[in-house]
Image (spheres, helix red, strand yellow):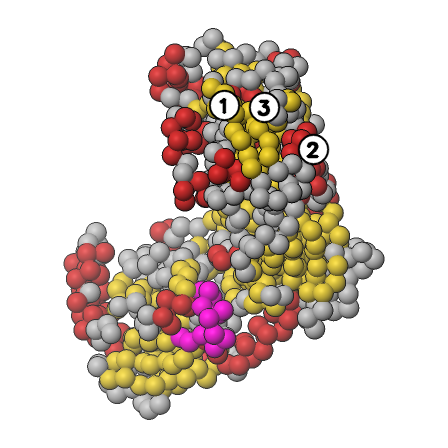
Amino acid sequence: MKKPVKTVLISLVAAAAITCAADSPRDIAATRALVKEHARSAVAVEVRFKAPEGDESTGFNIPYMCPNCNRTHYNSLSDYVGDDKPLVMAGYVVGPDRVMVQDLTVRSNFVDSVVIEFDGRRYKAAPVRRYPEQAAVELKAERPIEGAKPLAFTGGNVSAEEAKFFFHAKEDGLFVSGLLPGSALKFRHYAGIGKDLAPMPANVIVLDAKNRPVSLSFTSPVVLGEKGFTAPKTWKGEEPFAFDARLDAMQKKVNASLVPVYVHREEEKRSSGRSRFSIRIRGEDDGKGLDIDVVGYALPNGELLVPLNLDASMTAEIDKLEAVMPDGKRMPLEYVGAFDKYALAVVRFPDGKHPAGVVPMKLYSGKVEDLMLRKLYTLSVRSMDGVLSGELLQERALKFETVRGGETVPDVRLNAQNGRLPFAVTEDGEFVMGKCNRRTGKEWSRDTVVSSTSLATLLGDRKFNPEYAIRKGKDRIRVAWIGVETQPMTADLAREKKSAGFLKAFRTEGALVGRVFAGSPAEKAGIRPGDVLLYARRDGENERIALEASSRFGGSFDLSELIDRLEGSRLEIFDADDFAPWPDVEKGVNEVFTRFGIGTTVEVGYVSDGQKKEVKLTLAQTPVHFRNAKRFKSKTLGAAFADLTFEVRGFFKLEDDAPGVVVSKVKPGDPAAVAGLRPLEIVTHVDDKPVADVKALREAVNGKTEFNLSVRRLAATRIVRVKMQSDNRD
């Protein structure tokens, strides 16, 4: 527990004197006198919190206007509850048993207890009145506060220019802020409301020119040129629980525009390590699919806007979309499309109509400056098994900030943690701003602010990326490319290729072109082996996305040594689908190109012979590659095989017409393993007959109990005799 306020006040008189050091000794003396006079009018108020709705509420944040930096700070409810610590702030005595304190704008059921401390004595207290316009709460102590001196307000009405001093309350005491009247005030003119607004310290006593208390100020800013500071007895208050009722009504209104959405995705056996941001996955991935809970905004015409933070490959695997109704029933949804730059998708009810009780959310269309001083409500909500959870907070648009794209938006807290959908609305329930993830090349830009204006443009243009579509079968794995194979750059390579300065200028590690495929967009555009790729951007747009190569298998390694070590348990866990030494076609620069989409025209910047160049080309679809190659999984053999694709042939230096299939997995103890077959070897013949692909291999071994496999391992070839225990039919 912090020291009693009186003790701290006395210790801070010196700090007040330092603040006013530029003034005359008379001013310093006057300052000390003011501190001494009002020292017994300030008390410490200790608020403890609880989580009434269990663990789900612990993600809720408590807002508090900091008197030091004049910004709203947010502390997690879980910190207060879990650490059993209170929020301590300054309060002002306005009656024998009455204290005025900053309103934290949270529902009453989040407050566990309120205690007033003064001169080492503690008094239980409870709110008896709330003052929404002043952001203040009046507390009633269980008994008169002994030794406290209630502030005697003059009853006058003064402006910011007329106020001489502001006493600045800290969490642990009181000091004079040193703010002088008149020309010393900093202000901004807001054309939208035609007023000058000056920032003021939070939690202060307002004095007139004669150093008499006029009012209390718990918020910022104030309007210059207008009377605004009046005694608390003139404030318009309301019953404490009227605020709760207003929040409940507002939350009900907002929730009517929110719909829990259930996404079922059939995840196929593919590359590992793909990130899933801001989604909640229920249960374990047992190979039967993944369930994802998201929250959708209701749009007109039976549509929903949902944050679907999936890449193109993961979107392709969506099998089912459903809306969860309040009664728990599920209604099917149709997928419309996903936006190119934002991780947002549009889905709709099949009949084009929202079910009863669902109300489309309106977008705020006024000027952003018109929101100055208006009440806003922020909500961070998520769906848990189809049930919405999240708490509404009331704030005021006191400040603005500039976000990506140069837009100005209210400076309010939007909590996007733990997969929450965060947004702010007006008192009329109009969407003002929200947060979502943004697609930036192969990375996600998290928590990007999207204003109502941007969202309206996005929904109006409806420019969906055709690559972010639900697909079936082989069509699920679609990768865009320009037809090059790349490798990571090093400092030595950068110097050799005269590209170091360009890499630094465009903030990229770059990608060295090692191979250009015949007939590819890159070859037609004039890109050659030895060139260094820098960036790509959509034709007609300015935003560049860095092109960087991914390392194969984390670096170079000896394939022969790897195969030799694949014995016993190591052999059991090895799977070439996840652990292949050849370049992964889906990674590196192709991740960026795939986000643009097959058929998109892009401009690629690169360095060739020490010169920076830029070329325009159209992205093509990659040929069949190892990730989507045809497979043959033989349970009787205990092995899996894949067709030889272009990157696998390139790695093994095989001709385009050379026969064979690659061994992708071998199960210990089964006939293939007993015979000595190993992953990453090439099966070229069955009983001296060439094998062109996995279909030919399956036909060649089906029904046989014994057969020979011609196996190539790097440059060496051997014969493997396979003996089956029963008829081999797969």
The image shows residue 48, relative to residue 707, as above or below, that is below
Question: Whole-Å distance between the Cαs marked 3 and 2?
Answer: 14 Å
How dense is the environment of label 2, judged by Cα within 10 Å: few (below 14), some, or many (20 and up)?
few
Residue 340 point in image, percent of width and height: 64, 39
Q: Which residue is mark 3?
A: 684
Question: Whole-Å distance between the Cαs marked 1 and 2?
Answer: 22 Å
The quarter of the picture where the C terminus appears is: top right
Look at 74% across and 56% down and name the residue there: 333
Q: Amino acid at mark 3?
A: Thr
Residue 58 painted magenta: yes
Between 549 and 440, which is closer to the camera in this rendering? Answer: 549
Q: Amino acid at mark 2?
A: Glu
Q: Which residue is mark 2?
A: 699
Residue 275 point in image, percent of width and height: 51, 45
Look at 39% across and 12% down and name the residue there: 496
Between 399 and 495, which is closer to the camera in this rendering? Answer: 495
Tell me where residue 65 sits by quadrant: bottom left
Q: Secondary structure at mark 1?
A: strand
How dense is the environment of label 1, judged by Cα within 10 Å: few (below 14), some, or many (20 and up)?
few
The quarter of the picture where the N terminus appears is: bottom left
Residue 540 point in image, percent of width and height: 64, 26
Q: Secondary structure at mark 2?
A: helix
Residue 239 painted magenta: no
Contact between marks 1 and 3 (CB within 8 A): the answer is: no
The image shows residue 2, relative to residue 345, as above or below, that is below
Look at 55% across and 42% down and name the residue there: 638
Between 198 and 515, which is closer to the camera in this rendering? Answer: 515
Q: Please identify, in this view, whether the residue under mark 1 or under mark 3 is nearer the observer.
A: 1
Is residue 365 shown to the viewer in this render? no
Q: Which residue is mark 1?
A: 718
